[in-house]
Image (spheres, rainbow, N blue to C red):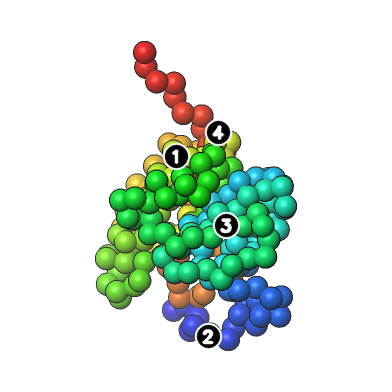
Amino acid sequence: MGKPYRPKDHYFQKAKQEGLRARSAFKVDEILKRFPGSVKKGAAVLDLGAAPGGFLQILADAVGMNGRVIGVDIAAIRPFSQKWVTTAVLDVLADDFDAKLAALYDGPYDAVISDMAPKTSGIKGTDEARSLRLAGKALEVAATRGRPGATFVAKVFMGGDFEAFRDEVRNHFEEVKIVRPEATRGASMEVYVVGLRRRAPAPAAT
């Protein structure tokens, strides 16, 4: 049995003390520390499922004022004072998502990070499939908009077609790691799939 969910747990209190918008900030902070160089100063980073902005706070510090962080979610995100952080309300599964994302920032990304999760139904197989659909969209963005050498991080619920998704990440990245950050709640099925060093796309056949 996992630990019971305690809304006012250690990480909740720590986030409050440190002025972080969400306890989830500690998850991305741990991932960046475990893989030094995965997000560098001056990098352009996309944060999918960014509300309320906990990941964005960590990423904004990681890239610094010469970097660029784009955060999108279906929920509005309270604006940031840092000028290098841009937020927008976008639905990643909408037909016009790619065009709207390009309008925000049309350059390549050095990292694509997704903390997206579906509204859970309580039906294990359904929730796993919805989670993988969101992670698959994040991987599609990383594969099309990530520069060679880029980093990919996506939250996924374990189970279902998880292995197939991990294999797909391996097709695009030189190294793939599975991370369950310490701040993850005890009963949660979530893990983060980390893709390191995006492979350069194969040249088109002539």
Residue situated in front as seen by the camera: 177 or 64: 64
Question: In the image, which disc is placed on residue 6?
Answer: 2
Q: How far across and how far down the image is residue 128, in percent?
A: 33, 62
Quarter of the figure with residue 55: bottom right
Return the disc, 3 or 4, that comes first in the chain's sequence. 3
Return the disc, 1 or 2, that comes first in the chain's sequence. 2
Return the disc, 2 or 3, that comes first in the chain's sequence. 2
| Residue at x-position 59% and y-position 67% | 79
Residue tagged 1: 143
Marks 2/3 in contact by CB < 8 Å: the verdict is no
Residue situated in front as seen by the camera: 200 or 60: 60
Residue tagged 4: 148
Return the disc, 1 or 4, that comes first in the chain's sequence. 1
For disc 3, the neighbor class at 10 Å (few under 14, some 14 to 19, many from 20) is: some
Q: Is residue 88 left or right of residue 118?
A: right
Q: For the residue marked with disc 1, what is the amino acid?
A: Ala
| Residue at x-position 36% and y-position 13% | 206
Q: CA distance from mark 2 to mark 3?
A: 32 Å
Q: CA distance from mark 3 to mark 4?
A: 23 Å
Location of the N terminus (image quadrant): bottom left
Marks 1/2 in contact by CB < 8 Å: the verdict is no
From this viewpoint, is residue 105 visible?
A: yes
| Residue at x-position 39% and y-position 46% | 99
Marks 1/4 in contact by CB < 8 Å: the verdict is no
Residue tagged 3: 86
Question: In the image, which disc is placed on residue 44?
Answer: none
